[in-house]
């Protein structure tokens, strides 16, 4: 049994090559990313940082659930979850760049960072005590910092089990349980604020009480998909012989179940907003259905229809081929989902920044058009707009109809950036994995995990 | 359920003993009537050569039937039979149909599977189910052979087999 993972030079080279590819794509986006190149660059950055940081957070969360629920079957591959959670510090560093941008104005992700726009906008003014750069910075640093402390605590207590050896009192495990009990409420509630600030506030006027749930479910499915893919990969490399079909079968159930859970939350959010039919809320879906139909419906196809139909059967969860295929599709699908959350709002912001008003909002009527203004670039555009009412509406309705690569659908540069960030993520995860034995010999549940069996009708290929 | 079955059965105290006994019985080509255990014993089904249950296929069909019933019925009601506008929504308001469609899918699948299962097993109201020994739903593991028309010699050799493989009790019963 191969208990120690070695991070080979070849793997490192491949991942570094992919990271370079990602970097090249980001540079290309900045200099040749089309009409809204800088907006595209920063949204890509935020998109990938939020996606992978969230996955890392969910690994800590699932880990805490496992510890608190006396769950045994995870134990065999708990080092993978620990390794995934080690990406959190990198996520925080990337977020510091975005935080700095809020103050220094070198990116235009959030409309509410623009003081003049907030002043002219009663809705943003009302939200200013929450949506402001100071709160964003302090909350992000404190909360992600707290997650990091918990992630490192779980990791160190888990390694301490190995050091302690046979311990009838399970000292390290019992301490882990206390930390886990604290982490579930703390992590659960604080993550909602993170999602509101990082992602939901791009559509600064809009809000949805379901959004935090829905986004967390997206992270959770992605986290399970990454665990599955890492295990299949490591098994193919000859590691983790003690993680069998049985474990992957249960992880497949997670993938199936949480995909359905995600759909449930997606639909709950959609139906409540559709049913209430309040203009400020429906605008979010109006924009997406009218102008981004590929994103909107594609999202449901990849993240619900595909895993639901493929993983419904028993045997597809037990075959590494189909399970791996669905995991890849769903991982990409949820990245796509985040794209769908972030890009339409920021495209709108970018278009406004170029001095105009989009047709989509015009029909909403009612309140002050200044409130809809998402000024990005310089006072010129602002002055022009303050003076005019909605006279540019028609002109911009035409503009909204055109196609913007990197906003309407992910372009090659987005895919490249995704691969780059993914490679960095994997590099961090595999480095962490190489630092400790894969086999947690003194985990109190390791024997239960080794003998985990879910399938009664196991056919011949059983072991 | 067949009437007047003469059954010879052995009670084991432990599932590992039972598994060994079933393996050996299969190796000696003995005709096992059935095996009764108080809980699902892992690894027993492949040894007995039981096929995977097809109940879930019935479940899928019933579920799909529920989906169609709910969706088509609501579509018919709200577009043909009795069109009413609710809350300014169109007649054919798909999002409002989804929760009911979901509920009926679950309901049809659940009830359909229960009925199918009862039918296959010959269970239902008024059916009495003969029990070999009440302890097989508690802590005994039972391996049973049917002995209708079997010679004394073969019954004795089966008894020998049960005792040899560690059965703590061997009984004969007509059910």
Image: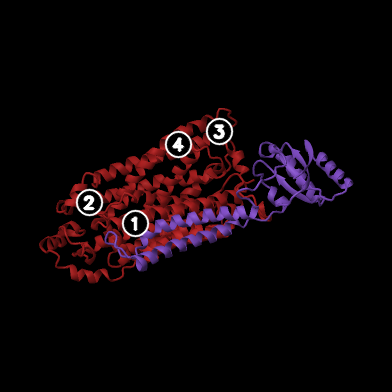
Direction left: furthest residue: A387
Mark sitting earlier along the chain (4/1): 4
The residue tagged with tag 4: helix, strand or loop? helix
Mark sitting earlier along the chain (3/4): 3
Label ID, residue A163: 3
Palette colour of chain A: red
Mark 3–mark 4 CB contact (< 8 Å): no
Residues at marks 2 and 1, CA–CA distance in whole angstroms: 31 Å
Residues at marks 3 and 4, CA–CA distance in whole angstroms: 21 Å
Q: Which is closer to the viewer, label 1 or label 3? A: 1
Q: Which is closer to the viewer, label 3 or label 2? A: 2
Q: Which residue is mark 4?
A: A180
Indicate the position of residue B130 as horizontal and vertical percent values: 70, 44
Indicate the position of residue B76 as horizontal and vertical percent values: 39, 66
Front position in the image: B105 or A461? B105
Q: Which residue is mark 1?
A: A271
Residues at marks 3 and 2, CA–CA distance in whole angstroms: 49 Å
Residue A290, by quadrant, is bottom left
Q: Which residue is mark 2?
A: A113
Lateral position of residue A102 relative to residue A330, left or right:
left
Front position in the image: A153 or B148? B148
Lateral position of residue A461 relative to residue A406, left or right:
right
Is disc 2 on the same chain as disc 3? yes
The residue tagged with tag 2: helix, strand or loop? helix
Residue A271, by quadrant, is bottom left
Chain for mark 1?
A
């Amino acid at each position: 049994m191969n208990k120690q993972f070695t991070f080979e030079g070849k793997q490192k080279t491949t991942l570094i090559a992919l990271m370079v590819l990602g970097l090249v794509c980001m540079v290309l986006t900045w200099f040749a990313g089309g009409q809204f190149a800088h907006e595209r660059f920063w949204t890509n950055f935020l998109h990938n940082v939020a996606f992978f940081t969230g996955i890392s957070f969910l690994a800590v969360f699932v880990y805490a659930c496992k510890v608190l629920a006396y769950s045994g079957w995870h134990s065999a591959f708990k080092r993978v979850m620990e390794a995934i959670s080690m990406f959190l510090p990198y996520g925080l560093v990337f977020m510091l760049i975005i935080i700095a941008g809020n103050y220094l104005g070198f990116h235009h992700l959030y409309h509410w960072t623009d003081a003049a726009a907030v002043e002219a906008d009663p809705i943003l003014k009302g939200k200013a005590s929450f949506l402001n750069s100071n709160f964003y910075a302090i909350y992000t640093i404190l909360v992600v910092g707290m997650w990091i402390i918990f992630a490192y605590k779980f990791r160190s207590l888990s390694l301490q089990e190995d050091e302690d050896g046979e311990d009838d009192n399970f000292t390290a495990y019992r301490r882990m349980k206390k930390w886990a009990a604290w982490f579930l409420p703390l992590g659960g509630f604080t993550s909602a604020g993170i999602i509101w600030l990082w992602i939901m506030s791009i559509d600064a006027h809009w809000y949805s009480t379901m959004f935090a749930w829905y986004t967390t479910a997206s992270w959770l499915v992605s986290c399970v998909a990454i665990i599955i893919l890492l295990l299949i990969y490591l098994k193919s490399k000859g590691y983790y012989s003690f993680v069998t079909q049985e474990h992957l079968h249960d992880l497949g159930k997670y993938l199936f179940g949480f995909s359905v859970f995600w759909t449930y939350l997606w639909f709950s959010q959609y139906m409540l907003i559709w049913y209430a039919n309040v203009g400020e809320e429906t605008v979010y879906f109006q924009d997406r259905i009218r102008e981004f139909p590929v994103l909107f419906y594609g999202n449901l196809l990849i993240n619900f229809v595909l895993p639901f139909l493929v993983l419904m059967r028993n045997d597809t969860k037990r075959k590494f081929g189909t399970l791996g295929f669905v995991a890849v599709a769903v991982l990409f699908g949820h990245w796509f989902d985040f794209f769908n959350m972030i890009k339409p709002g920021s495209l709108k912001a970018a278009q406004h920044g170029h001095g105009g008003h989009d047709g989509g909002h015009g029909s909403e009527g009612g309140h002050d058009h200044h409130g809809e203004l998402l000024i990005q670039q310089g006072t010129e555009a602002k002055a022009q707009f303050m003076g005019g009412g909605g006279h540019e509406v028609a002109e911009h309705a035409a503009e909204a109809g055109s196609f913007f690569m990197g906003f309407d659908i992910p372009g090659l540069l987005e895919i490249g950036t995704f691969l780059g960030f993914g490679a960095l993520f994997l590099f961090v995860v595999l480095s962490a994995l190489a630092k400790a034995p894969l086999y947690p010999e003194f985990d109190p549940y390791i024997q239960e995990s080794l003998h985990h069996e879910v399938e009664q009708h196991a056919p011949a290929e059983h072991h | 359920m067949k009437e007047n079955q003469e059954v010879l059965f052995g009670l084991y105290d432990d599932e590992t003993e039972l598994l060994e006994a079933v393996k050996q019985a299969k190796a000696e080509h003995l005709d096992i009537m059935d095996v009764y255990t108080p809980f699902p014993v892992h690894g027993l089904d492949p040894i007995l050569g039981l096929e995977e249950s097809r109940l879930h296929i019935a479940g899928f069909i019933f579920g799909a039937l529920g989906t169609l019933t709910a969706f088509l019925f609501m579509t018919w009601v709200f577009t043909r039979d009795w069109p009413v506008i609710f809350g300014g929504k169109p007649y054919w308001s798909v999002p409002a149909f989804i929760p009911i469609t979901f509920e009926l899918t679950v309901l049809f699948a659940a009830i359909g599977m229960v009925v199918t299962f009862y039918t296959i097993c010959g269970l239902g109201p008024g059916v009495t189910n003969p029990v070999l020994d009440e302890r097989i739903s508690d802590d005994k593991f039972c391996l049973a052979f049917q002995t209708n028309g079997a010679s004394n010699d073969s019954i004795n050799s089966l008894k020998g087999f049960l005792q040899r493989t560690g059965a703590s009790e061997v009984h004969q019963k007509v059910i």
